[in-house]
Image (cartoon, helix red, strand yellow):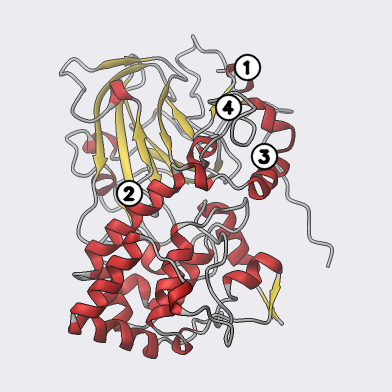
């Protein structure tokens, strides 16, 4: 039996979310006849590219043949993970697969509905294909594969917005994981519709919270910073400079200018402080203004060559560094993420930058309409502390805050208030 690495389980919890749904993989010797299989249009488009482009076909065939085990070995198959989340004897060995298996892989991924803990397993399987595998990297990072991945991501997004993405069994798992907090949220429909008022998975993932469940502490006190989102605060950088590398997610570290995509306001935060909060799968996935003021700039940092599955120009380096274990590990091709930013001008505390960072399975950064990029007038848009300014669709999320020098030194607490939450040790 193959014991799953504990750190891999941590990744599954933090990542939110792209794992296995109804298995479309057949075990060895039990494959369906080709005529019985049905593939979605986007997967059939991959087949058309494979059938008509000899070079592309060679890249894929060689990618499958050239795959080698990662340091953790081959991952369990999605079917085994669904049945036995901690152990598996059935491994997904890429060199044993052919193009039809690859089609099955993407077909299953395109329609999978995640539960609260299995969020990264398809990513891990694809990482296993790309690990030290030049042809696999060419498949997803160069044309025509790169453009196809964009279409795949869009198709996956369409599925998550469809009624087919509501699986009652999986939704029961989410309800159980949330516990009493399930009642903190407002379903968008009557509770007789869909699963207790949620008719698509993205409706559930972007659910709204009851105001009384997230009251704003001292809303009129401008000296009090409000948490922008649910989450785990795990990074605080002091005394930022032009070379300071701020950890966003997994292997991505960016300096202030990179985080803000060259914004004219970036220099204001040199010498200041940065914080980062990671949202967990069960968290409320809207984000709110941490302070009152005027939003003077917003921007979506768009896809640049090769970012669909979290890739950019460093794709080849990320995929070959060999560490796939924990939160701060170099997580292969998923090291660079889609993000947006808001620049807030406050009355007494200078400028605050807020950067939501989303996982690129589905482009997941969404601005509230009045704060959308391109809609901010030169005079800015007023914002209240705690006002909702955007949300993560399926695929978020980290929220980074930047402060000018001397404004925010760290998290200050009074004795007796909540400092955090403890996880029980496994009794093994």
Residue shown at the point (49%, 66%) measured from the top left: 122
Q: Earlier in the sequence, mark 4 or mark 2?
A: 4
Residue shown at the point (63%, 22%) measured from the top left: 213
Find disc 4 in the rendering and name its residue.
Answer: 187
Find disc 3 in the rendering and name its residue.
Answer: 420
Find disc 1 in the rendering and name its residue.
Answer: 212
Between 75 and 226, the residue placed more toward the observer is: 75
Q: State the mark number for residue 338.
A: 2
Residue 29: x and y, percent?
58, 88
Q: Quadrant of the C terminus?
A: bottom right
Dot 3 crowding, Cα within 10 Å, few <14, some 14–19, many 20+? few
Query: Do the CB atoms of the residues marked 4 and 2 lie less than 8 Å apart?
Result: no
How far apart marks 4 and 3 lie (CA) works out to: 28 Å
Residue 389: x and y, percent?
38, 25
Between 386 and 86, the residue placed more toward the observer is: 86
Q: Earlier in the sequence, mark 2 or mark 3?
A: 2
Q: Tag 2, which secondary structure?
A: strand
Dot 2 crowding, Cα within 10 Å, few <14, some 14–19, many 20+? many
Query: Do the CB atoms of the residues marked 4 and 3 lie less than 8 Å apart?
Result: no
Q: Tag 1, which secondary structure?
A: helix
Residue shown at the point (65%, 45%) measured from the top left: 168
Q: Tag 4, which secondary structure?
A: loop
How far apart marks 1 and 4 lie (CA) works out to: 15 Å
Q: Which of the two marks, 1 or 3, is nearer to us in this view?
A: 1
The vertical placement of 91 against 237, above or below, is: below
Residue 346: x and y, percent?
33, 18
Q: Earlier in the sequence, mark 1 or mark 4?
A: 4
The vertical placement of 155 against 105, above or below, is: above
């Amino acid at each position: 039996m193959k014991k799953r690495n504990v750190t891999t389980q941590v990744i599954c919890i933090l990542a939110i979310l792209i794992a296995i749904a109804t298995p479309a993989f057949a075990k060895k010797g039990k494959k369906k006849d080709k005529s019985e299989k049905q593939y979605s249009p986007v997967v059939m488009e991959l087949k058309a590219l494979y059938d008509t482009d000899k070079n592309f076909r060679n890249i894929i065939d060689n990618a499958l043949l050239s795959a080698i085990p990662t340091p953790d070995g081959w991952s369990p198959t999605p079917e085994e993970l669904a049945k036995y989340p901690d152990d598996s004897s059935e491994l997904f060995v890429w060199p044993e697969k052919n193009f039809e298996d690859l089609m099955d892989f993407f077909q299953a991924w395109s329609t999978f509905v995640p539960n609260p803990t299995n969020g990264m397993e398809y990513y891990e399987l694809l990482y296993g294909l790309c690990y030290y595998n030049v042809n696999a990297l060419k498949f997803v990072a160069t044309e025509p594969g790169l453009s196809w991945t964009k279409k795949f991501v869009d198709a996956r997004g369409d599925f998550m917005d469809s009624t087919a993405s509501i699986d009652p069994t999986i939704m029961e798992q989410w309800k159980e994981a949330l516990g009493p907090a399930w009642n903190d949220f407002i379903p968008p429909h009557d509770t007789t519709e869909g699963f207790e008022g949620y008719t698509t998975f993205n409706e559930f993932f972007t659910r709204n919270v009851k105001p009384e469940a997230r009251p704003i502490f001292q809303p009129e006190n401008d000296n009090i910073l409000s948490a922008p989102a649910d989450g785990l605060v795990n990074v605080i950088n002091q005394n930022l400079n032009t070379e300071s590398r701020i950890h966003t997610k997994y292997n991505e570290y960016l300096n202030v200018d990179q985080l803000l995509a060259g914004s004219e306001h970036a220099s204001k935060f040199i010498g200041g402080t940065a914080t980062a909060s990671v949202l967990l799968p069960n968290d409320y996935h809207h984000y709110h203004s941490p302070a009152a003021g005027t939003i003077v700039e917003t921007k979506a940092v768009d896809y640049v060559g090769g970012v669909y599955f979290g890739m950019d120009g460093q794709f080849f380096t990320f995929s070959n560094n060999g560490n796939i274990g924990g939160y701060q590990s170099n997580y292969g091709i998923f090291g660079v993420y889609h993000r947006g930013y808001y620049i807030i001008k406050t009355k007494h505390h200078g400028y605050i930058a807020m950067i939501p960072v989303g996982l690129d399975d589905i482009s997941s950064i969404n601005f509230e309409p009045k704060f959308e990029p391109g809609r901010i007038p030169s005079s800015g848009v007023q914002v209240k502390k705690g006002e909702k300014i955007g949300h993560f669709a399926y695929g978020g999320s980290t929220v980074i805050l930047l402060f000018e020098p001397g404004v925010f030194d760290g998290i200050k607490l009074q004795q007796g208030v909540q400092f955090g939450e403890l996880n029980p040790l496994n009794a093994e």
